Image (spheres, rainbow, N blue to C red):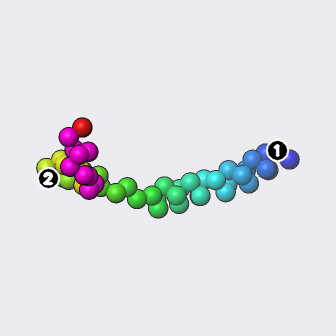
Amino acid sequence: MIPEVLSIVFGGLVPGFLLGLLAFKVKSRWCPRCGESTDAMRPAERER
C-alpha cells in the first residue's frame, strides 16, 4: 500500500518540478557589457 502511494506522489511531483524548472525565468539584473545593475534606482539609493 505505501509503495503504491509513494510512487503516485513522486510520479506527480517529479514532472511538476521539471515543468516549474523549465518555466522559471530569471530576469537579467546586470548589464553584460559594463556590469551595472539594470534595475532603475533613485540617485539617493546609489550613494549608499
Identify the residue at horizontal 67%, vertical 57% (top origin).
12
Question: Which residue ends up furthest to the right in the rendered image?
Answer: 1
Amino acid type at mark 1:
Ile
Foreground residue among 37 and 46: 46
| Quarter where residue 39 is shown | bottom left
**SS class, disc 2:** loop
Q: Position of residue 1 (x, y in %)?
A: 86, 47
Q: CA distance from mark 1 to mark 2?
A: 54 Å
Q: Is residue 7 left or right of residue 39?
A: right
Label 2 crowd (10 A; few <14 / some 14-19 / many >=20): few
**SS class, disc 1:** helix
Q: Position of residue 48 (x, y in %)?
A: 24, 37
Label 1 crowd (10 A; few <14 / some 14-19 / many >=20): few
Q: Is residue 11 left or right of residue 30?
A: right
Q: Position of residue 44 (x, y in %)?
A: 23, 46
Residue at which label 1 appears: 2
Question: Which residue ends up furthest to the left in the rendered image?
Answer: 34
Q: Position of residue 31 (x, y in %)?
A: 20, 53
Q: Earlier in the sequence, mark 1 or mark 2?
A: 1
Q: Is residue 40 left or right of residue 6?
A: left
Are the two marked residues, 1 and 2, in contact with CB atoms closer than 8 angstroms?
no
Identify the residue at horizontal 67%, vertical 55% (top origin).
11
Which span of residues is magenta-colored? Answer: 39-47
Identify the residue at horizontal 26%, vertical 52% (top origin).
41
Residue 20 circle label: none
Residue at which label 2 appears: 33
Foreground residue among 37 and 43: 43
Amino acid type at mark 2:
Arg
Q: Is residue 43 magenta?
A: yes
